[in-house]
Image (spheres, rainbow, N blue to C red):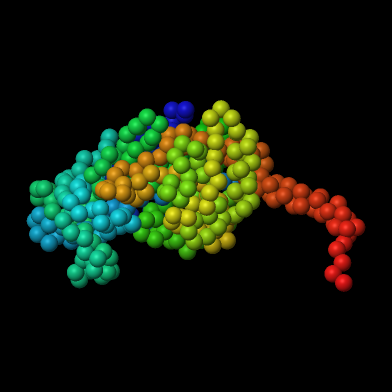
Amino acid sequence: MSESLIDIIRRLLPLPTASCHEHHVVAEIRRYASERDLALLADNFGNLVLRTDATSASGLCLTAHMDHPALGFPVRESTRDILFEKLGGVPTDLTRGARVLLYDTTPAIHGLPNPVGGGSVTAFLEEGIPGAALPCPAFRVRVDDDVPDDVTDGELFAVWDLTPCALDGKRIVGTACDDLAGVCVALATLDRCRRDGVGISVLLTRAEETGFGGMLSALHADDLSADDIYINIECSSCRAGAALGEGPVLRVGDRRWTFDAGVTAALATCADELAGDGFRVQRRLMDGGACEATPLSRSGRTTGAVALPLDNYHNNGGDRLRAEAVHLQDAANLVALLTQLARKPHGVRAAVDDTTRDLDHMLASRRPAQADRLQKRRISID
């Protein structure tokens, strides 16, 4: 097991995050990049791009998002009652009485940030916050104590008060596995490629849970190379048919779209090369939701996708809100798979082209003999 993967999980998974409130995650990734002398850039929308400094460029870009369904953009009704905008999908029938932790967006200098308060959800307002510019559904939260005066409303957000990060046997448990576990896999792959002298990049986006905000903004600004091969890393509900512990998923599509067959085939080839010693993968559509591979693919960029099977998707524990969970070995196997692809000697695009060329050769080689046999045994319809 890669120690760097475990270290990254322990650093990132406990951090509070929400759409447009990814400040704590960004701060930790900045520290991570600085420790390794990685190139780190932020675009005009706060998306992050990390790159390894290597002479061997793979042409691979891994993508993941830094947010998770939570609560933000508060409006105070009183000193004890706050309306929070619902940010992302969550089973609202399970939220009545649910506990939340309040944070401000100021990152901690060292260690994990401390909550500035706590509270409980007392109501869900489908019609949203009265008078708000956007008609977004909202939660009413009764806070335990007054929020400190030095915390401005613009800095305040809330996350579900669940297990932030724990290892339960082989399961990684956390409030926001989707998609901080995907971010951890991307960074662990980047770190391994850096040590191997292989150049890859990682795109970490914001506000995915509220409608692909960061990704769509980056695509509209034409900030992303049209030459790279993109692979989106997600955590996707195991209810779509992929069991935890059976391996990461080669995701051929989502609820809205199917992805590049050549990229999927190249990943499958890498999986065959790694077969054995506990390595396994699954191949599924994973249509429980949509992911950022869809807008990437629709933009004309060559895009594939992988996923970690996820339990308690969006904290839906069936009878109450629960922490999400992914399998540690699935995450480790996914790092190995993506690293294997990045190491291809002539780059990832050449590996993708090889798979399609092999398929075309196989189809072409079968035609002559089959056609000759069919012509010799024609069936008359006279």
Q: Position of residue 302 (x, y in %)?
A: 59, 55
Tell me if I can see residue 380 in this picture. Answer: yes
Q: Which one is in front, 357 or 50? A: 357
Q: Position of residue 12 (x, y in %)?
A: 35, 39
Residue ranking furthest to the right: 376
Q: Which one is in front, 14 or 194? A: 14
Tell me if I can see residue 62 in this picture. Answer: no
On the rendered image, what quadrant is the C terminus found in? Answer: bottom right
Q: Residue at x 50, y 41 (%)?
A: 248
Q: Position of residue 140 (x, y in %)?
A: 17, 58
Q: Residue at x 69, y 50 (%)?
A: 356
Q: Position of residue 236 (x, y in %)?
A: 43, 48
Q: Which one is in front, 14 or 359? A: 359
Locate residue 64 relative to residue 74 in the image: left or right. Answer: right
Q: Residue at x 73, y 47 (%)?
A: 358
Locate residue 43 relative to residue 108 in the image: left or right. Answer: right
Count the numbered circles shown.
0
Above or below, 237 relative to 3: below
Above or below, 194 relative to 64: above
Q: Residue at x 56, y 27 (%)?
A: 277
| Quarter holding residue 139 | bottom left
